[in-house]
């Protein structure tokens, strides 16, 4: 059995154990909303982000369309980012992380119970913008028979979802490079899941396999730790043993900050700079000799175009 197959089997086994152990919290009636209306229950213990500030489920069902102005703004943003990256001799890609409803739609709604118009913002943008966007939803769906991809009680993908999303990103932006799963740093961890906590005040921890941080932290502004703020967090990972000694800068959110995606990048690339922001600072990318500039965002946030970037001097 390969390391990947063994990992997928253990991850799935842990998911089943955790679901059974915490059944009293996971067995919410179908479509039960959390008290703050942020989480909603699907089938078999699966929990999802509901509408909230981004009207996410309305987006997914095709009830929210991007305006022509918003589509144009996104297209111009991606084109500017591609041009700015080329000007500093870097490659560019924007990774759109699919939401759980898009990966596991039948865990959210019984088959045939909800009509989904294939017009959610990610699909509108992919139709409008010919290159620069990577939306690995089809790859994730194709792996769902053998991989968990997401935790039941968490809004993020789990380690297997991150791996397959990473593979699709690299296939799009670095097709000439090889990425062996043997290099993925894995660890057993105890996690509290963000959606599950919406349904209980109990301190529920689950044993999971996570992507470990094995690269050295050579800079960390510790903004989250010291102020609780999200936007503006910035750290740099260094891995002298990575197979590709190149510099990557990723502007992202929680998926990259502490759910392991930056650490996965740092398993293969010598230096990974993470900045929690939707604005790309191309002068910073130039200063650190970035050869790959990435934007990473959760799908639900595409409803709003990103702000103007900082261009290289």
Image: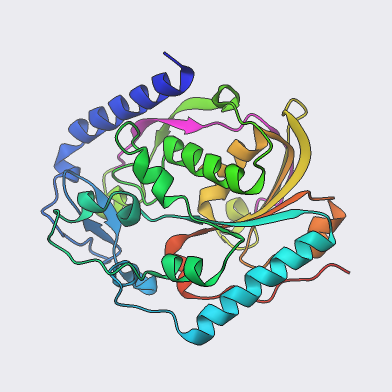
User: Farthest residue in the top direction?
Assistant: 1
Q: Residue at x 57, y 47 (%)?
A: 169
Q: Residue at x 33, y 36 (%)?
A: 148
Does residue 186 show up magenta in the picture?
no
Q: Quadrant of residue 306?
A: bottom right
Looking at the image, residue 281 lies above or below residue 110: below
Colour pattern of the rendering: rainbow
**Position in image of residue 151 (x %, y %):** 34, 41
Looking at the image, residue 48 lies above or below residue 175: below
**Position in image of residue 97 (x %, y %):** 47, 54
Q: Quadrant of the N terminus?
A: top left
Q: Quadrant of residue 134?
A: bottom right
Looking at the image, residue 134 lies above or below residue 166: below
**Position in image of residue 244 (x %, y %):** 75, 33
Query: Of 137 and 38, which appears nearest the observer?
Result: 137
Number of disc labels: 0
Can the viewer see residue 150 in this picture?
A: no
Q: Which residues are magenta?
A: 203-223
Q: Quadrant of the C terminus?
A: bottom right
**Is 248 displayed left or right of 195 in the figure?**
right
Q: Residue at x 35, y 22 (%)?
A: 10
Looking at the image, residue 303 lies above or below residue 195: below
Q: Residue at x 35, y 45 (%)?
A: 141
Does residue 211 show up magenta in the picture?
yes
**Position in image of residue 64 (x %, y %):** 34, 78
Can the viewer see residue 222 in this picture?
A: yes
Query: Of 39 and 6, which appears nearest the observer?
Result: 6
């Amino acid at each position: 059995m390969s390391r990947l197959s063994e990992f997928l089997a253990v991850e799935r086994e842990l998911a089943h154990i955790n679901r059974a152990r915490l059944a009293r919290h996971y067995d919410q009636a179908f479509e039960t909303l959390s008290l703050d209306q942020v989480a909603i229950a699907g089938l078999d213990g699966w929990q999802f982000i509901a509408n909230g500030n981004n009207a996410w489920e309305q987006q997914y069902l095709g009830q929210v369309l991007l305006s022509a102005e918003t589509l144009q703004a996104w297209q111009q943003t991606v084109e500017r980012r591609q041009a700015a990256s080329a000007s500093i001799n870097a490659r560019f890609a924007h990774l759109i992380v699919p939401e759980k409803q898009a990966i596991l739609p039948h865990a959210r709604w019984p088959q045939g119970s909800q009509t989904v118009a294939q017009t959610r913002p990610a699909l509108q943008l992919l139709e409008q913008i010919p290159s620069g966007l990577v939306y690995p939803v089809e790859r994730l769906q194709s792996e769902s028979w053998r991989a968990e991809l997401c935790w039941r009680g968490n809004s993020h993908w789990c380690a297997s979802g991150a791996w397959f999303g990473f593979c699709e990103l690299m296939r799009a932006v670095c097709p000439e490079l090889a990425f062996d799963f043997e290099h993925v740093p894995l660890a057993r961890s105890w996690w509290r899941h963000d959606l599950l906590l919406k349904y209980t005040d109990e301190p529920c921890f689950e044993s999971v396999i996570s992507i470990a941080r094995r690269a050295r932290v050579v800079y960390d502004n510790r903004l989250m730790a010291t102020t609780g703020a999200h936007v503006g967090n910035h750290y740099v990972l260094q891995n002298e043993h990575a197979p590709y000694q190149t510099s990557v800068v990723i502007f992202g959110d929680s998926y990259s900050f502490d759910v392991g995606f930056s650490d996965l990048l740092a398993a293969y690339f010598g230096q990974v700079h993470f900045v929690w922001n939707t604005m790309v600072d191309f002068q910073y990318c130039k200063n650190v000799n970035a050869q790959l500039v990435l934007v990473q965002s959760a799908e639900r946030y595409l409803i709003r175009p990103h702000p103007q970037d900082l261009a290289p001097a």
